[in-house]
Image (cartoon, rainbow, N blue to C red):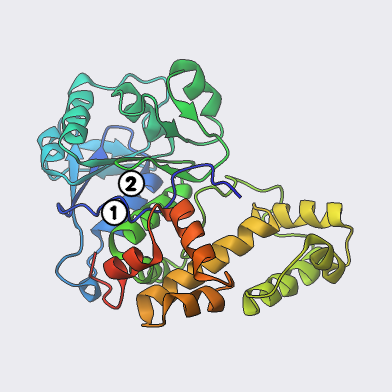
């Protein structure tokens, strides 16, 4: 099925400049900032010498306040943005608060020279104010979607997804979606294995598709439904090559087709077809990175049947071929 956004794409080359700069400001969103610091700022010697470097650029003079009573002293001022390969805007102090001209100018210059600019949650309003999202797709917390559309009609706001990757400009939904976007960027730069290692230390799922809904009706199904959907999902994952018509899945779950589709989406945020495709692509990427298995065998093992089908979905989802993906990410976690 068609994807609604730009997905992880090895067609976008990794930043040769590994310096990640997070913006700090008075009224800093602590959680969003913490996500950026945890993913990109934590020492990770197991990743080798080519891993990210991290710094904090303060846009307000002196000591800044963060939510929860935390005080922040930055590594430098807005000039640090000019040195970054990736700039992160971790939220903003208010969607109606003006963005300082010096920050707008610094972001525009960074983007013009090829730096990647990433926003978490309300940070999208900073990118929009800088004009970096004009003519592009973007997302934000579901509470702010309408306001973003009203204020910036030249942006295509996709309000019901976790994150959107438009190449050098990336946006995420509410706070926790920032984790998904940051892991996505790690995956884009270093491959699935590296992203999985970071996710494992964070004790979070290694991958949630950017097109997944921001929230589901119930994060955990009621007990009688969980006892039916949980084993069914385990079965699908264990035998990923099998065909799974909705009628068969509904029968295994003991539900009507209509009820099953509704309950499955409520539990996972996606349709069974979307879930299965994501699982198969994940399996294929792991095999491409970790083995020398021929691509036609990978296609069979991951449930695509034929190499042509695998290549079709790779191009559609990642804008690259399985062979190109293997050449970039295969065998060495630090090959990005």
Foreground residue among 116 and 8: 8
Q: Does dot 1 land on a helix, a strand or a loop?
A: helix
Mark 1–mark 2 CB contact (< 8 Å)? yes
Residue that carries the numbered disc 1 in the rendered image:
37
Q: Does dot 2 land on a helix, a strand or a loop?
A: helix
Residue that carries the numbered disc 2 in the rendered image:
33
Q: Residue at x 33, y 28 (%)?
A: 126
On screen, residue 181 versus residue 227, left or right, reads left
Residue 331: percent from the left, percent from the top?
29, 78
Residue 29: percent from the left, percent from the top?
37, 40
Residue 151: percent from the left, percent from the top?
45, 16
Foreground residue among 265 and 225: 265
Is residue 124 shown above or below 254?
above
Quadrant hosting residue 228: bottom right
Q: Residue at x 47, y 48 (%)?
A: 177
Q: Is residue 303 visible?
A: yes
Quadrant hosting residue 131: top left
């Amino acid at each position: 099925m068609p994807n609604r956004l730009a997905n992880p794409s090895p067609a976008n080359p990794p930043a040769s400049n590994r310096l990640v700069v997070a913006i700090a400001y008075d009224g800093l969103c602590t959680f969003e900032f913490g996500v950026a610091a945890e993913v990109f700022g934590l020492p990770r010697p197991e990743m080798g010498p080519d891993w990210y470097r991290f710094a904090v650029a303060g846009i307000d003079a002196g000591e800044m306040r963060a939510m929860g009573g935390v005080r922040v002293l930055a590594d430098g001022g807005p000039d640090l943005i000019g040195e970054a390969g990736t700039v992160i805007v971790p939220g903003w102090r208010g969607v109606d608060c003006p963005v300082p001209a010096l920050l707008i100018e610094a972001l525009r210059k960074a983007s013009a020279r090829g730096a990647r600019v990433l926003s978490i949650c309300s940070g999208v309003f900073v990118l929009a104010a800088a004009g970096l999202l004009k003519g592009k797709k973007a997302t934000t917390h579901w509470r702010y979607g309408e306001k973003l559309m009203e204020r910036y009609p030249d942006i295509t706001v996709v309000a019901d997804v976790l994150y959107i990757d438009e190449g050098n400009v990336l946006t995420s939904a509410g706070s926790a979606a920032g984790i998904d976007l940051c892991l996505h960027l790690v995956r884009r730069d270093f491959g699935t294995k590296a992203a999985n290692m970071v996710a494992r230390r964070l004790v979070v799922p290694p991958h949630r598709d950017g097109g997944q809904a921001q929230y589901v009706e119930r994060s955990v199904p009621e007990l009688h439904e969980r006892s039916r959907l949980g084993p069914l999902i385990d079965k699908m994952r264990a035998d990923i090559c099998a065909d799974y018509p909705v009628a068969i899945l509904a029968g295994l779950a003991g539900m009507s087709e209509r009820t099953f589709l509704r309950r499955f989406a409520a539990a996972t945020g996606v349709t069974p077809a979307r879930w299965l495709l994501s699982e198969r692509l994940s399996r294929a990427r792991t095999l491409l990175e970790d083995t020398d298995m021929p691509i036609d065998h990978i296609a069979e093992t991951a449930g695509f049947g034929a190499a042509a089908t695998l290549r079709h979905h790779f191009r559609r989802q990642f804008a690259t071929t399985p062979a190109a993906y293997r050449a970039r990410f295969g065998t060495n976690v630090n090959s990005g």
